[in-house]
Amino acid sequence: MLLNGAPDDATDGPPILTGLNRALSSQPLIDAHRLAHYLADINPDLVIAPFAGGIAQGVLAARGCGEAFARTRVALWYDGPSRTRFLLDDELLTGMAPLVADGLERQSITLADALLVRTNGSPALPGWVTSAAPPTFEVALPGPLATGDAPQSAGREIREIVFAGPIRKSAGIHEFIAATERLAAKGLLAGRTIVFLGVVRSSGSGISREWLGRRAGAWPFAFKVIEEQDAGAVRRYLADRGRLAVSIGHDNDQLDFIRSCGSNHLGFLGPSEDAATFIDHLEATLRDTLVHRALPSQEPKPAVADWRKLAKRLRRLPVRPIHESAPGKRGASPLIRRLARLTGHVGITVCVLHHNRLAELASALATIPDSADGHSVEVIVIDNASDNPSVEEEIRARAPECPRLRIIRLTEPMPQTAAFNRGLSEARGDIVFFLDDDNAYLPGGLARLARAVDQGRFDIAVTALEIFEGDQPAADPTVGRLIFMGEAHSAGLFFNAFGDTSMAVRRDVFTNFGGFHNRGYDYPALDWVTLAKAQAAGLRIGALQWPAVRYRRDSGRAELATKKLDQEGARALVFEAYRGALDGELLARYAQKLQLEEP
Protein backbone atom coordinates (compact mmCIF):
# COMPACT_ATOMS: atom_id res chain seq x y z
CA MET A 1 0.00 0.00 0.00
CA LEU A 2 1.30 3.45 -0.91
CA LEU A 3 -0.02 5.95 1.60
CA ASN A 4 -0.08 9.71 1.77
CA GLY A 5 -2.25 10.31 4.84
CA ALA A 6 -4.87 8.83 7.12
CA PRO A 7 -7.95 7.51 5.23
CA ASP A 8 -11.11 9.53 5.60
CA ASP A 9 -13.02 6.54 6.94
CA ALA A 10 -10.46 5.78 9.68
CA THR A 11 -12.50 7.67 12.26
CA ASP A 12 -14.60 4.97 13.95
CA GLY A 13 -14.47 4.58 17.71
CA PRO A 14 -14.46 6.97 20.65
CA PRO A 15 -13.14 10.54 20.42
CA ILE A 16 -9.36 10.66 20.18
CA LEU A 17 -7.76 12.85 22.85
CA THR A 18 -4.19 13.94 23.48
CA GLY A 19 -2.46 15.72 26.33
CA LEU A 20 -2.15 18.80 24.16
CA ASN A 21 -5.93 18.97 23.62
CA ARG A 22 -5.55 21.14 20.51
CA ALA A 23 -6.93 19.51 17.40
CA LEU A 24 -4.69 21.16 14.80
CA SER A 25 -1.45 20.77 16.72
CA SER A 26 -2.24 17.16 17.63
CA GLN A 27 -3.32 16.18 14.13
CA PRO A 28 -0.11 14.37 13.06
CA LEU A 29 -0.31 12.14 16.16
CA ILE A 30 -4.04 11.49 15.69
CA ASP A 31 -3.56 10.68 11.98
CA ALA A 32 -0.79 8.19 12.74
CA HIS A 33 -2.93 6.50 15.42
CA ARG A 34 -6.00 6.25 13.20
CA LEU A 35 -3.98 4.89 10.32
CA ALA A 36 -2.67 2.06 12.50
CA HIS A 37 -6.22 1.05 13.41
CA TYR A 38 -7.35 1.27 9.79
CA LEU A 39 -4.50 -0.85 8.45
CA ALA A 40 -4.77 -3.48 11.19
CA ASP A 41 -7.93 -4.81 9.53
CA ILE A 42 -6.07 -5.07 6.21
CA ASN A 43 -2.77 -6.42 7.61
CA PRO A 44 -0.73 -5.52 4.51
CA ASP A 45 2.55 -7.17 3.58
CA LEU A 46 4.17 -3.84 2.76
CA VAL A 47 3.47 -0.21 3.59
CA ILE A 48 5.25 2.67 1.86
CA ALA A 49 4.49 5.94 3.61
CA PRO A 50 5.86 9.50 3.50
CA PHE A 51 8.57 10.33 6.00
CA ALA A 52 7.41 13.93 6.53
CA GLY A 53 4.68 14.15 9.15
CA GLY A 54 5.44 10.75 10.69
CA ILE A 55 2.20 9.17 9.42
CA ALA A 56 3.70 5.66 9.77
CA GLN A 57 4.54 6.07 13.48
CA GLY A 58 1.36 4.37 14.72
CA VAL A 59 1.94 1.30 12.53
CA LEU A 60 5.60 1.10 13.56
CA ALA A 61 4.84 1.61 17.26
CA ALA A 62 2.18 -1.12 17.18
CA ARG A 63 4.61 -3.47 15.48
CA GLY A 64 7.40 -2.61 17.91
CA CYS A 65 5.09 -3.33 20.85
CA GLY A 66 3.99 -6.65 19.35
CA GLU A 67 0.36 -5.58 18.94
CA ALA A 68 -0.02 -5.93 15.17
CA PHE A 69 1.78 -5.88 11.80
CA ALA A 70 4.24 -8.62 12.73
CA ARG A 71 4.68 -9.52 9.04
CA THR A 72 4.30 -6.02 7.63
CA ARG A 73 7.40 -4.33 6.23
CA VAL A 74 7.38 -0.53 6.40
CA ALA A 75 9.38 1.69 4.06
CA LEU A 76 9.53 5.47 4.39
CA TRP A 77 9.51 7.65 1.30
CA TYR A 78 11.98 10.40 2.11
CA ASP A 79 10.45 13.77 1.25
CA GLY A 80 12.41 15.86 3.76
CA PRO A 81 11.82 16.32 7.50
CA SER A 82 9.18 18.67 8.91
CA ARG A 83 11.94 20.20 11.01
CA THR A 84 13.77 21.63 7.96
CA ARG A 85 10.59 23.05 6.49
CA PHE A 86 9.62 24.64 9.79
CA LEU A 87 13.04 26.27 10.18
CA LEU A 88 12.79 27.81 6.70
CA ASP A 89 9.06 28.54 6.68
CA ASP A 90 7.93 32.16 7.02
CA GLU A 91 4.30 31.40 7.75
CA LEU A 92 3.03 33.02 10.95
CA LEU A 93 1.29 29.86 12.09
CA THR A 94 2.64 29.14 15.55
CA GLY A 95 0.97 25.81 16.26
CA MET A 96 2.89 22.90 17.70
CA ALA A 97 2.13 20.48 14.85
CA PRO A 98 5.69 20.70 13.40
CA LEU A 99 7.14 19.72 16.78
CA VAL A 100 4.71 16.81 17.06
CA ALA A 101 5.53 15.73 13.50
CA ASP A 102 9.24 15.97 14.28
CA GLY A 103 8.83 13.58 17.21
CA LEU A 104 6.85 11.12 15.08
CA GLU A 105 9.46 11.27 12.30
CA ARG A 106 12.33 10.64 14.71
CA GLN A 107 10.57 7.55 16.02
CA SER A 108 9.69 6.32 12.56
CA ILE A 109 13.24 6.50 11.26
CA THR A 110 14.45 4.25 14.10
CA LEU A 111 11.69 1.66 13.59
CA ALA A 112 11.23 1.46 9.79
CA ASP A 113 12.73 -1.29 7.62
CA ALA A 114 13.80 0.82 4.65
CA LEU A 115 14.26 4.42 3.51
CA LEU A 116 13.52 5.30 -0.11
CA VAL A 117 15.36 8.25 -1.65
CA ARG A 118 15.33 9.69 -5.15
CA THR A 119 18.19 9.07 -7.51
CA ASN A 120 17.44 12.46 -9.07
CA GLY A 121 17.00 15.17 -6.52
CA SER A 122 16.01 13.92 -3.07
CA PRO A 123 16.48 16.49 -0.31
CA ALA A 124 19.77 15.95 1.50
CA LEU A 125 19.64 13.65 4.52
CA PRO A 126 20.50 15.53 7.74
CA GLY A 127 22.84 13.90 10.22
CA TRP A 128 20.15 12.86 12.69
CA VAL A 129 18.41 10.93 9.89
CA THR A 130 21.50 9.18 8.53
CA SER A 131 22.64 8.14 12.02
CA ALA A 132 19.36 6.28 12.65
CA ALA A 133 18.34 5.35 9.10
CA PRO A 134 17.48 1.77 8.07
CA PRO A 135 18.80 0.32 4.76
CA THR A 136 18.47 2.97 2.04
CA PHE A 137 17.20 2.30 -1.48
CA GLU A 138 17.59 4.74 -4.37
CA VAL A 139 14.47 4.93 -6.52
CA ALA A 140 14.39 6.49 -9.98
CA LEU A 141 11.41 8.68 -10.74
CA PRO A 142 10.79 11.22 -13.49
CA GLY A 143 11.55 14.74 -12.39
CA PRO A 144 15.14 15.95 -11.96
CA LEU A 145 15.80 19.29 -10.31
CA ALA A 146 14.38 21.14 -13.29
CA THR A 147 11.91 19.54 -15.69
CA GLY A 148 9.82 20.58 -18.64
CA ASP A 149 8.20 19.48 -21.88
CA ALA A 150 8.29 22.58 -24.09
CA PRO A 151 9.02 22.50 -27.83
CA GLN A 152 12.25 23.95 -29.22
CA SER A 153 10.49 27.23 -30.01
CA ALA A 154 9.45 27.77 -26.39
CA GLY A 155 11.87 30.63 -25.70
CA ARG A 156 10.52 32.77 -28.54
CA GLU A 157 6.87 32.22 -27.59
CA ILE A 158 7.13 32.98 -23.88
CA ARG A 159 5.48 36.30 -22.95
CA GLU A 160 5.19 35.78 -19.19
CA ILE A 161 7.33 34.08 -16.57
CA VAL A 162 4.91 32.96 -13.87
CA PHE A 163 5.96 32.17 -10.31
CA ALA A 164 3.29 29.60 -9.38
CA GLY A 165 2.85 28.94 -5.70
CA PRO A 166 2.29 30.69 -2.39
CA ILE A 167 4.11 34.03 -2.20
CA ARG A 168 6.31 33.31 0.79
CA LYS A 169 9.92 32.74 1.71
CA SER A 170 9.64 28.98 2.15
CA ALA A 171 8.26 28.67 -1.40
CA GLY A 172 11.41 30.22 -2.86
CA ILE A 173 10.16 33.74 -3.55
CA HIS A 174 13.49 35.34 -2.56
CA GLU A 175 15.47 33.03 -4.82
CA PHE A 176 13.08 33.52 -7.75
CA ILE A 177 13.20 37.32 -7.47
CA ALA A 178 17.01 37.31 -7.18
CA ALA A 179 17.35 35.17 -10.33
CA THR A 180 14.83 37.32 -12.20
CA GLU A 181 16.61 40.54 -11.27
CA ARG A 182 19.87 39.09 -12.56
CA LEU A 183 18.25 38.19 -15.88
CA ALA A 184 16.79 41.70 -16.15
CA ALA A 185 20.21 43.28 -15.46
CA LYS A 186 21.66 41.23 -18.32
CA GLY A 187 18.85 42.25 -20.69
CA LEU A 188 17.51 38.71 -21.02
CA LEU A 189 13.89 39.34 -20.07
CA ALA A 190 13.29 41.15 -23.36
CA GLY A 191 10.02 42.84 -22.39
CA ARG A 192 8.50 39.77 -20.75
CA THR A 193 6.18 40.23 -17.78
CA ILE A 194 6.85 38.61 -14.42
CA VAL A 195 3.67 37.23 -12.83
CA PHE A 196 3.19 36.11 -9.23
CA LEU A 197 0.33 33.61 -9.17
CA GLY A 198 -0.71 32.36 -5.77
CA VAL A 199 -1.77 33.33 -2.27
CA VAL A 200 -0.19 36.44 -0.78
CA ARG A 201 -0.85 38.17 2.53
CA SER A 202 -2.07 41.76 2.38
CA SER A 203 0.26 42.95 5.13
CA GLY A 204 2.27 41.69 8.05
CA SER A 205 5.79 41.10 9.18
CA GLY A 206 6.49 38.43 6.57
CA ILE A 207 6.19 38.33 2.79
CA SER A 208 3.12 40.38 1.83
CA ARG A 209 1.72 42.67 -0.87
CA GLU A 210 3.34 45.58 0.93
CA TRP A 211 6.73 43.85 0.93
CA LEU A 212 6.39 42.88 -2.73
CA GLY A 213 5.40 46.43 -3.69
CA ARG A 214 8.41 47.93 -1.95
CA ARG A 215 10.74 45.37 -3.53
CA ALA A 216 9.29 46.05 -6.98
CA GLY A 217 9.83 49.81 -6.75
CA ALA A 218 13.09 49.68 -8.71
CA TRP A 219 12.25 46.90 -11.14
CA PRO A 220 12.79 47.86 -14.82
CA PHE A 221 10.40 45.16 -16.00
CA ALA A 222 6.62 44.80 -15.93
CA PHE A 223 5.05 42.60 -13.26
CA LYS A 224 1.66 41.76 -11.82
CA VAL A 225 0.25 39.84 -8.88
CA ILE A 226 -2.69 37.47 -9.32
CA GLU A 227 -4.01 36.14 -6.04
CA GLU A 228 -5.45 32.71 -6.76
CA GLN A 229 -5.68 29.49 -4.79
CA ASP A 230 -8.19 27.53 -6.84
CA ALA A 231 -6.28 24.71 -8.55
CA GLY A 232 -8.54 24.74 -11.61
CA ALA A 233 -8.06 28.46 -12.16
CA VAL A 234 -4.28 28.10 -11.81
CA ARG A 235 -4.24 25.23 -14.30
CA ARG A 236 -6.29 27.21 -16.85
CA TYR A 237 -4.02 30.25 -16.52
CA LEU A 238 -0.85 28.22 -17.02
CA ALA A 239 -2.24 26.25 -19.97
CA ASP A 240 -1.39 29.20 -22.28
CA ARG A 241 1.77 28.27 -24.23
CA GLY A 242 2.97 31.84 -23.90
CA ARG A 243 3.45 31.42 -20.15
CA LEU A 244 6.42 29.71 -18.53
CA ALA A 245 5.47 28.31 -15.10
CA VAL A 246 8.15 28.24 -12.43
CA SER A 247 7.49 26.45 -9.15
CA ILE A 248 9.76 25.71 -6.21
CA GLY A 249 8.55 23.06 -3.80
CA HIS A 250 9.70 20.66 -1.11
CA ASP A 251 7.83 17.65 -2.47
CA ASN A 252 6.97 16.03 -5.76
CA ASP A 253 3.21 16.61 -5.41
CA GLN A 254 3.58 20.31 -6.14
CA LEU A 255 5.91 19.63 -9.06
CA ASP A 256 3.53 17.03 -10.48
CA PHE A 257 0.76 19.64 -10.36
CA ILE A 258 2.90 22.12 -12.29
CA ARG A 259 3.69 19.48 -14.91
CA SER A 260 -0.02 18.94 -15.40
CA CYS A 261 -0.70 22.62 -16.10
CA GLY A 262 0.73 22.92 -19.61
CA SER A 263 3.68 22.36 -21.88
CA ASN A 264 5.95 25.06 -20.42
CA HIS A 265 7.07 24.41 -16.88
CA LEU A 266 10.12 24.44 -14.66
CA GLY A 267 9.93 22.63 -11.33
CA PHE A 268 12.63 22.85 -8.69
CA LEU A 269 13.11 20.96 -5.43
CA GLY A 270 14.13 23.46 -2.82
CA PRO A 271 14.90 26.06 -1.77
CA SER A 272 17.81 24.68 0.19
CA GLU A 273 19.81 26.29 2.94
CA ASP A 274 22.55 26.97 0.34
CA ALA A 275 20.56 29.81 -1.22
CA ALA A 276 23.43 31.23 -3.33
CA THR A 277 23.98 27.94 -5.18
CA PHE A 278 20.25 27.52 -5.68
CA ILE A 279 19.93 31.02 -7.17
CA ASP A 280 22.80 30.31 -9.58
CA HIS A 281 21.08 27.11 -10.71
CA LEU A 282 17.70 28.83 -11.07
CA GLU A 283 19.17 31.72 -13.10
CA ALA A 284 21.08 29.36 -15.41
CA THR A 285 18.00 27.23 -16.06
CA LEU A 286 15.82 30.28 -16.86
CA ARG A 287 18.53 31.73 -19.08
CA ASP A 288 18.90 28.50 -21.05
CA THR A 289 15.15 28.25 -21.46
CA LEU A 290 14.78 31.84 -22.74
CA VAL A 291 17.95 32.11 -24.83
CA HIS A 292 18.47 28.61 -26.15
CA ARG A 293 14.75 27.99 -26.53
CA ALA A 294 14.77 24.56 -24.93
CA LEU A 295 13.75 23.29 -21.51
CA PRO A 296 15.97 20.84 -19.63
CA SER A 297 13.61 17.97 -20.36
CA GLN A 298 15.12 17.66 -23.82
CA GLU A 299 17.87 15.69 -22.08
CA PRO A 300 17.26 11.94 -21.69
CA LYS A 301 14.81 11.23 -18.92
CA PRO A 302 15.86 8.94 -16.07
CA ALA A 303 14.43 5.46 -15.88
CA VAL A 304 11.19 5.03 -14.00
CA ALA A 305 11.30 2.78 -10.94
CA ASP A 306 10.11 -0.80 -11.33
CA TRP A 307 7.74 -0.75 -8.37
CA ARG A 308 6.86 -4.44 -8.66
CA LYS A 309 10.51 -5.41 -8.39
CA LEU A 310 11.13 -2.91 -5.58
CA ALA A 311 8.14 -4.19 -3.61
CA LYS A 312 9.47 -7.74 -3.80
CA ARG A 313 12.83 -6.60 -2.43
CA LEU A 314 11.21 -4.66 0.40
CA ARG A 315 8.94 -7.53 1.38
CA ARG A 316 11.99 -9.78 1.81
CA LEU A 317 13.62 -7.41 4.31
CA PRO A 318 13.81 -8.57 7.93
CA VAL A 319 11.74 -6.63 10.42
CA ARG A 320 14.14 -4.11 11.87
CA PRO A 321 14.99 -4.72 15.54
CA ILE A 322 14.92 -1.70 17.81
CA HIS A 323 17.87 -2.60 20.02
CA GLU A 324 20.17 -3.56 17.16
CA SER A 325 23.32 -3.19 19.26
CA ALA A 326 21.96 -4.69 22.48
CA PRO A 327 21.13 -8.39 21.94
CA GLY A 328 21.28 -8.92 25.71
CA LYS A 329 17.97 -7.07 26.02
CA ARG A 330 16.05 -9.69 24.08
CA GLY A 331 13.18 -11.38 25.81
CA ALA A 332 13.48 -14.81 27.34
CA SER A 333 13.07 -17.86 25.11
CA PRO A 334 10.03 -20.14 25.55
CA LEU A 335 12.28 -22.78 27.16
CA ILE A 336 13.64 -20.30 29.71
CA ARG A 337 10.11 -19.14 30.47
CA ARG A 338 8.99 -22.73 31.04
CA LEU A 339 11.88 -23.37 33.41
CA ALA A 340 11.10 -20.12 35.22
CA ARG A 341 7.50 -21.22 35.78
CA LEU A 342 8.62 -24.63 37.05
CA THR A 343 11.00 -23.04 39.55
CA GLY A 344 8.41 -20.54 40.72
CA HIS A 345 10.19 -17.51 39.25
CA VAL A 346 8.03 -14.42 39.11
CA GLY A 347 8.25 -12.66 35.75
CA ILE A 348 5.81 -9.79 36.35
CA THR A 349 5.03 -7.61 39.34
CA VAL A 350 2.02 -5.28 39.37
CA CYS A 351 2.27 -2.44 41.90
CA VAL A 352 -1.14 -1.01 42.78
CA LEU A 353 -1.25 2.17 44.83
CA HIS A 354 -4.23 2.37 47.18
CA HIS A 355 -5.71 4.87 49.61
CA ASN A 356 -9.22 4.58 51.12
CA ARG A 357 -10.85 3.11 47.97
CA LEU A 358 -11.50 -0.56 48.72
CA ALA A 359 -14.34 -0.98 46.22
CA GLU A 360 -12.32 0.50 43.37
CA LEU A 361 -9.28 -1.52 44.41
CA ALA A 362 -11.29 -4.74 44.27
CA SER A 363 -12.33 -3.90 40.70
CA ALA A 364 -8.73 -3.21 39.72
CA LEU A 365 -7.39 -6.42 41.29
CA ALA A 366 -10.06 -8.47 39.53
CA THR A 367 -8.54 -7.49 36.16
CA ILE A 368 -5.02 -8.74 36.99
CA PRO A 369 -4.46 -12.31 35.73
CA ASP A 370 -2.37 -14.99 37.50
CA SER A 371 -0.08 -15.18 34.47
CA ALA A 372 0.48 -13.15 31.36
CA ASP A 373 2.39 -13.86 28.17
CA GLY A 374 4.06 -16.87 29.80
CA HIS A 375 5.01 -15.06 33.02
CA SER A 376 3.78 -15.63 36.56
CA VAL A 377 2.26 -12.47 38.04
CA GLU A 378 2.66 -11.19 41.58
CA VAL A 379 0.62 -8.27 42.92
CA ILE A 380 1.92 -5.73 45.40
CA VAL A 381 -0.71 -3.43 46.92
CA ILE A 382 0.93 -0.36 48.41
CA ASP A 383 -1.53 0.97 50.95
CA ASN A 384 -0.64 4.62 51.38
CA ALA A 385 -1.76 5.08 55.00
CA SER A 386 -5.47 4.38 54.60
CA ASP A 387 -7.68 5.38 57.56
CA ASN A 388 -9.03 1.86 58.12
CA PRO A 389 -6.88 0.04 60.75
CA SER A 390 -7.89 -3.36 59.35
CA VAL A 391 -7.28 -2.40 55.74
CA GLU A 392 -4.91 -5.30 55.09
CA GLU A 393 -7.54 -7.88 56.05
CA GLU A 394 -10.13 -5.98 54.00
CA ILE A 395 -7.89 -6.06 50.94
CA ARG A 396 -7.24 -9.79 51.22
CA ALA A 397 -10.96 -10.46 51.62
CA ARG A 398 -11.61 -8.62 48.37
CA ALA A 399 -8.80 -10.33 46.44
CA PRO A 400 -9.28 -14.11 46.83
CA GLU A 401 -8.22 -14.60 43.18
CA CYS A 402 -4.73 -13.16 43.72
CA PRO A 403 -2.53 -16.09 44.83
CA ARG A 404 0.65 -13.99 44.80
CA LEU A 405 -0.65 -10.98 46.69
CA ARG A 406 1.65 -8.96 48.91
CA ILE A 407 0.58 -5.89 50.85
CA ILE A 408 2.88 -3.09 51.93
CA ARG A 409 1.17 -1.08 54.65
CA LEU A 410 2.52 2.45 55.02
CA THR A 411 1.71 3.97 58.37
CA GLU A 412 2.63 7.48 57.23
CA PRO A 413 1.52 8.83 53.86
CA MET A 414 4.17 9.07 51.13
CA PRO A 415 4.24 11.09 47.91
CA GLN A 416 2.99 8.98 45.02
CA THR A 417 6.45 8.79 43.48
CA ALA A 418 8.01 7.51 46.71
CA ALA A 419 5.24 4.95 47.18
CA PHE A 420 5.66 3.56 43.66
CA ASN A 421 9.43 3.47 44.11
CA ARG A 422 8.91 1.47 47.30
CA GLY A 423 6.90 -1.04 45.28
CA LEU A 424 9.64 -1.09 42.62
CA SER A 425 12.26 -1.94 45.27
CA GLU A 426 10.10 -4.80 46.59
CA ALA A 427 9.22 -6.24 43.16
CA ARG A 428 10.49 -9.70 42.25
CA GLY A 429 9.40 -9.57 38.62
CA ASP A 430 11.68 -8.67 35.73
CA ILE A 431 8.87 -6.49 34.36
CA VAL A 432 7.11 -4.13 36.76
CA PHE A 433 3.69 -2.54 36.20
CA PHE A 434 2.17 0.44 37.99
CA LEU A 435 -1.55 1.05 38.45
CA ASP A 436 -3.73 3.42 40.47
CA ASP A 437 -6.48 1.73 42.42
CA ASP A 438 -9.32 3.39 40.49
CA ASN A 439 -8.10 2.16 37.10
CA ALA A 440 -8.27 -1.33 35.64
CA TYR A 441 -6.76 -3.52 32.91
CA LEU A 442 -8.71 -4.32 29.80
CA PRO A 443 -8.87 -8.00 28.78
CA GLY A 444 -5.41 -8.99 27.57
CA GLY A 445 -4.07 -5.52 28.33
CA LEU A 446 -1.49 -6.57 30.89
CA ALA A 447 -0.14 -9.27 28.58
CA ARG A 448 0.21 -6.81 25.70
CA LEU A 449 2.12 -4.34 27.86
CA ALA A 450 4.38 -7.15 29.08
CA ARG A 451 5.06 -8.25 25.52
CA ALA A 452 6.17 -4.76 24.49
CA VAL A 453 8.91 -4.84 27.14
CA ASP A 454 9.66 -8.57 27.20
CA GLN A 455 10.50 -8.84 23.51
CA GLY A 456 13.43 -6.52 24.08
CA ARG A 457 11.75 -3.73 22.18
CA PHE A 458 11.46 -1.07 24.84
CA ASP A 459 12.63 -0.23 28.35
CA ILE A 460 9.24 1.34 29.13
CA ALA A 461 5.87 0.62 27.55
CA VAL A 462 2.98 3.05 27.93
CA THR A 463 -0.51 2.58 26.57
CA ALA A 464 -3.38 4.46 25.07
CA LEU A 465 -6.07 4.83 27.74
CA GLU A 466 -9.77 4.06 27.49
CA ILE A 467 -11.37 6.80 29.56
CA PHE A 468 -14.49 6.40 31.67
CA GLU A 469 -16.24 8.52 34.27
CA GLY A 470 -17.85 7.00 37.33
CA ASP A 471 -16.96 4.22 39.76
CA GLN A 472 -17.38 1.02 37.74
CA PRO A 473 -14.45 0.27 35.38
CA ALA A 474 -16.20 -2.74 33.90
CA ALA A 475 -19.58 -1.08 33.33
CA ASP A 476 -19.25 2.66 32.81
CA PRO A 477 -19.22 3.71 29.14
CA THR A 478 -16.09 4.85 27.36
CA VAL A 479 -16.01 8.61 26.81
CA GLY A 480 -12.74 8.90 24.89
CA ARG A 481 -9.37 7.40 24.06
CA LEU A 482 -6.26 9.21 25.28
CA ILE A 483 -3.22 8.49 23.08
CA PHE A 484 0.50 9.08 23.55
CA MET A 485 3.64 9.19 21.44
CA GLY A 486 5.97 7.40 23.82
CA GLU A 487 9.18 9.08 22.75
CA ALA A 488 7.99 12.65 22.32
CA HIS A 489 11.29 14.45 21.67
CA SER A 490 10.97 18.26 21.71
CA ALA A 491 7.15 18.22 21.75
CA GLY A 492 7.37 16.64 25.21
CA LEU A 493 8.55 19.95 26.65
CA PHE A 494 5.08 21.47 26.13
CA PHE A 495 2.62 18.67 26.90
CA ASN A 496 2.61 15.13 28.18
CA ALA A 497 2.94 13.20 24.95
CA PHE A 498 4.98 10.47 26.68
CA GLY A 499 2.43 8.42 28.62
CA ASP A 500 0.76 7.74 31.97
CA THR A 501 1.90 6.05 35.19
CA SER A 502 -0.12 3.03 34.03
CA MET A 503 2.95 1.61 32.37
CA ALA A 504 5.31 -1.37 32.34
CA VAL A 505 9.07 -1.04 32.86
CA ARG A 506 12.11 -3.24 32.67
CA ARG A 507 12.88 -3.47 36.39
CA ASP A 508 16.69 -3.39 36.28
CA VAL A 509 16.85 -0.54 33.75
CA PHE A 510 14.20 1.53 35.50
CA THR A 511 15.78 0.95 38.93
CA ASN A 512 19.23 1.97 37.68
CA PHE A 513 17.66 5.05 36.15
CA GLY A 514 16.29 6.00 39.59
CA GLY A 515 12.64 5.07 39.17
CA PHE A 516 9.94 7.71 39.48
CA HIS A 517 11.36 11.20 39.88
CA ASN A 518 10.96 11.72 43.62
CA ARG A 519 11.16 15.30 44.87
CA GLY A 520 10.04 14.50 48.41
CA TYR A 521 6.53 15.85 47.94
CA ASP A 522 3.51 15.42 45.70
CA TYR A 523 4.03 17.47 42.58
CA PRO A 524 2.05 17.92 39.36
CA ALA A 525 2.38 15.59 36.37
CA LEU A 526 4.75 13.04 37.91
CA ASP A 527 4.25 10.77 34.87
CA TRP A 528 5.18 13.56 32.47
CA VAL A 529 8.27 14.54 34.46
CA THR A 530 9.47 10.97 35.01
CA LEU A 531 9.07 9.93 31.38
CA ALA A 532 10.69 13.13 30.13
CA LYS A 533 13.67 12.39 32.37
CA ALA A 534 13.73 8.79 31.11
CA GLN A 535 13.87 9.83 27.47
CA ALA A 536 16.59 12.38 28.20
CA ALA A 537 18.57 9.52 29.80
CA GLY A 538 18.25 7.43 26.64
CA LEU A 539 15.58 4.94 27.71
CA ARG A 540 13.36 3.67 24.89
CA ILE A 541 9.62 4.28 25.38
CA GLY A 542 7.05 2.37 23.34
CA ALA A 543 3.39 3.31 23.09
CA LEU A 544 0.58 0.79 22.61
CA GLN A 545 -1.96 1.92 20.03
CA TRP A 546 -4.77 -0.24 21.44
CA PRO A 547 -5.74 0.67 25.03
CA ALA A 548 -4.57 -1.76 27.71
CA VAL A 549 -6.00 0.21 30.65
CA ARG A 550 -9.37 1.72 31.54
CA TYR A 551 -8.59 5.10 33.07
CA ARG A 552 -10.97 6.87 35.43
CA ARG A 553 -11.35 10.58 34.79
CA ASP A 554 -12.60 12.44 37.85
CA SER A 555 -13.01 16.03 36.70
CA GLY A 556 -14.42 17.24 40.00
CA ARG A 557 -11.51 15.87 42.00
CA ALA A 558 -8.97 17.24 39.53
CA GLU A 559 -10.41 20.73 39.76
CA LEU A 560 -9.84 20.72 43.52
CA ALA A 561 -6.36 19.14 43.53
CA THR A 562 -3.60 21.70 44.01
CA LYS A 563 -1.11 19.68 41.99
CA LYS A 564 -3.55 19.56 39.07
CA LEU A 565 -3.93 23.32 39.18
CA ASP A 566 -0.17 23.96 39.14
CA GLN A 567 0.36 23.69 35.39
CA GLU A 568 3.29 26.10 35.39
CA GLY A 569 4.98 24.04 38.09
CA ALA A 570 4.64 20.92 35.96
CA ARG A 571 6.23 22.60 32.95
CA ALA A 572 9.12 23.97 34.98
CA LEU A 573 9.85 20.50 36.35
CA VAL A 574 9.67 18.96 32.87
CA PHE A 575 12.17 21.52 31.62
CA GLU A 576 14.49 20.75 34.51
CA ALA A 577 14.31 17.01 33.81
CA TYR A 578 14.42 17.19 30.02
CA ARG A 579 16.38 20.25 28.93
CA GLY A 580 19.49 18.32 27.87
CA ALA A 581 17.52 16.44 25.19
CA LEU A 582 15.87 19.39 23.47
CA ASP A 583 16.33 20.51 19.87
CA GLY A 584 17.52 24.07 20.42
CA GLU A 585 17.15 25.26 16.82
CA LEU A 586 13.62 23.92 16.50
CA LEU A 587 12.48 25.48 19.76
CA ALA A 588 14.18 28.79 18.99
CA ARG A 589 12.30 29.00 15.68
CA TYR A 590 9.06 28.15 17.47
CA ALA A 591 9.72 30.97 19.94
CA GLN A 592 10.41 33.41 17.10
CA LYS A 593 7.05 32.66 15.55
CA LEU A 594 5.29 33.14 18.88
CA GLN A 595 7.02 36.49 19.37
CA LEU A 596 5.72 37.78 16.04
CA GLU A 597 2.16 37.42 17.31
CA GLU A 598 2.73 39.40 20.50
CA PRO A 599 0.94 42.79 20.57
Image: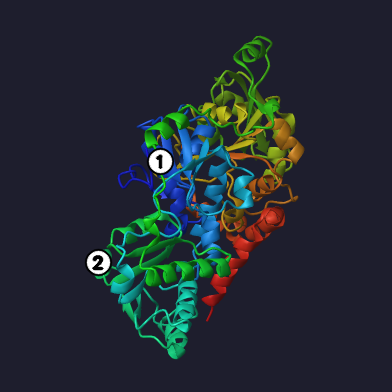
Q: Disc 1 residue type? A: Ala
Q: Is residue 566 above or below residue 90?
A: above
**Which residue is found at the position 49% from the left and 53% from the top?**
121
Residue 327: image location, x then y, percent = 68, 27
Please tell me whether mark 1 sits on a helix, a strand or a loop: loop
Please tell me whether mark 2 sits on a helix, a strand or a loop: loop
Q: Which residue is mark 2?
A: 239
Is residue 469 in view from this perspective?
Answer: no
**Which residue is found at the position 35% from the left and 83% from the top?**
191
Q: From the viewer's side, name the closer residue of 111 and 14.
A: 111
| Residue density around tag 1, few if under 14, some if 14–19, many if 20 or more, within 10 Å | some
| Residue density around tag 2, few if under 14, some if 14–19, many if 20 or more, within 10 Å | some
- Residue lying at the far bottom of the rendered structure: 217
Instruction: Decide which of tag 2 and tag 1 comes sooner along the chain.
Output: 2
**Which residue is found at the position 46% from the left and 88% from the top?**
214
Badge count = 2
Q: Which residue is mark 1?
A: 305
The numbered disc on residue 176 is none
Q: Disc 2 residue type? A: Ala
Residue 396: image location, x then y, percent = 61, 24
Left of 497 or right of it: where is 572? right
Q: From the viewer's side, name the closer residue of 236 and 453.
A: 236
Q: Is residue 285 above or below residue 126?
A: below
Is residue 208 in view from this perspective?
Answer: yes
Q: Is residue 542 above or below residue 569?
A: above
Residue 242: image location, x then y, percent = 27, 72
Residue 33: image location, x then y, percent = 44, 43
Whole-number angstrom distance, CA of label 2 to CA of label 1: 29 Å
- State which quarter of the image contains the N terminus: top left
